[in-house]
Each structure stands twice: as C-alpha cells, then as structure tokens.
Image: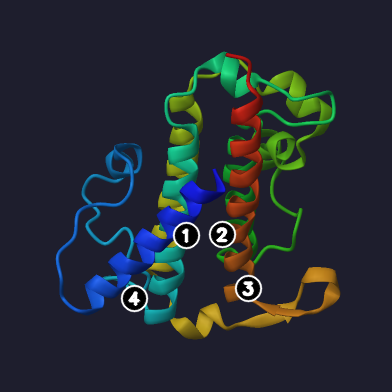
Amino acid sequence: MEHFYYNRRRKFLKASAAIGLGLSFKPLFSSAITKSNPNDDSMYLIGPQDGYAPQIGTLLSTMTMMRAWVIESVQGLNPDQLDYQLDDQSNSIGAMLLHLAATERYYQLNTFDEMEWGTWSDEIKKEWDIPMGLGEEAKEKIKGNEISFYLSKLDEVREITKSEFAKRDDDWLMKSELFFENKPTNNYCKWFHVCEHESNHNGQIKLIKKRIPV
C-alpha cells in the first residue's frame, strides 16, 4: 500500500512538472473523482480561480481537490458500510461525512456572518449540532442513509462557501481576531483548518473502509 501511494504521488509530481512545461498528460486519478466534478478541467491545479480574489481562489482550489479525494474514498459505499463502526468508541463513515458538512456550515456562520461561535439559531443547531459533536447521539441518529444523502449535504454547504467567497477580497481573508485557544488567527487560517480537517477525517475513513467485513 505504501508503494502504491508513493507511485501515485510521484506520478502527480511528474504531471505537475509536465503542466509547467506545457506538455499533455492523461488523467492520473480514478473516474470516481472525475465524475464528481465532470466540468472542472482545473481540478488538480492549485492556484487562482476565475471569479475569485487570488488568495481566495487558491484556497478554494485546495479545498476542491481535498473534497474530490474524500468523495473518491466513499464513492459506492452502501448504507451498511456507511454505518459500520470499528468499535463503540469510533464514528461511522456516514457520521463523519455529515460532520464535515456541519464543520463547514459553522465556519460559514462564523466567518461570513461574523457570528461568535455557538450563537447561531436553534434551528441551525437542531440541524447541525449532532453531526458537529459526533459522539453517542450521532451514533444513534446518523444511520440508514444512502451515500447520495451525504454527498448532497456536502455539496449544498460547499455551494454556499463558493458563493460567499466570490463576494469577498483577499483583505477579508487576512482579517484577524482572537480565536483558536484565544490566540490571533485570521479567516485564511480558519478556512485552511476546514480543509485540513477533511484531510484528517479522510484518513480515518480510509482506515474504517479497510476494516469493513466483506
């Protein structure tokens, strides 16, 4: 498995170099990723995006790539697989997918609407608090859903992010305040955290997939 990921990364780096040289190359990733974003020809190019300020577009391109990898990890899983738990301490893949959507939704409220963490309406909390917190209640209530349910939630929230990003400039991205552990941070750091948070859970998802009984 380590050899597989080494080769995949090496191919990706070679392809990146080929882009810089103006060379053509075949897609490196599986059709699961390609099909999730069939009209996005720049999926694997990190950098400014049309319709967005330079830094915001670059951040969004990173988030888009990370989301594609998450989708690749879960593509085709059935409800039983999505509900599977390694043990009574673990979360299911389905719960983690909804957790990713909840995390993005709450960072939207905090950064776009400038709301202090946790001050949003009871209606929003009713929809998102359980997947945000995971734990026992999530184990009981987040189950029995098709993969399309989770992917729809992720897409629904991401469309809000893209729309709101398009309204803002890079000065907004650098806007700072006290946040993480009451230390200075900015909107760039918050949204980078949303992206790396997905990377963290994608690793957990891959681990659980390997342990699902055949």
- Circle 1: element type: helix
Q: Give the CA separation, mark 3 to mark 2.
A: 10 Å
Q: Give the CA separation, mark 3 to mark 4.
A: 17 Å
* Colour convention of the picture: rainbow
Q: Residue 179 location, x and y as percent?
A: 77, 72
Q: Which mark is residue 133?
A: none
- Circle 4 residue: 48
Q: Which mark is residue 63?
A: 1
Q: Quick one: label 2, few (<14), some, or many (20+) residues within 10 Å? A: many
- Circle 2: element type: helix
Q: Residue 37 location, x and y as percent?
A: 29, 46
Q: Earlier in the sequence, mark 3 or mark 1?
A: 1
- Circle 3 residue: 189
What amino acid does circle 4 point to? Pro
Q: Give the CA separation, mark 4 to mark 1.
A: 12 Å
Nearest the eye: 149 or 23: 23
Q: Residue 114 location, x and y as percent?
A: 63, 67
The residue that appears at 58% across and 66% down in the rendered structure is 191
Q: Quadrant of residue 183?
A: bottom right
- Quarter holding the C terminus is top right
Q: Earlier in the sequence, mark 4 or mark 1?
A: 4
Q: Give the CA separation, mark 4 to mark 2.
A: 17 Å
Label pair 2/1, CB-CB below 8 angstroms:
yes
- Circle 2 residue: 195
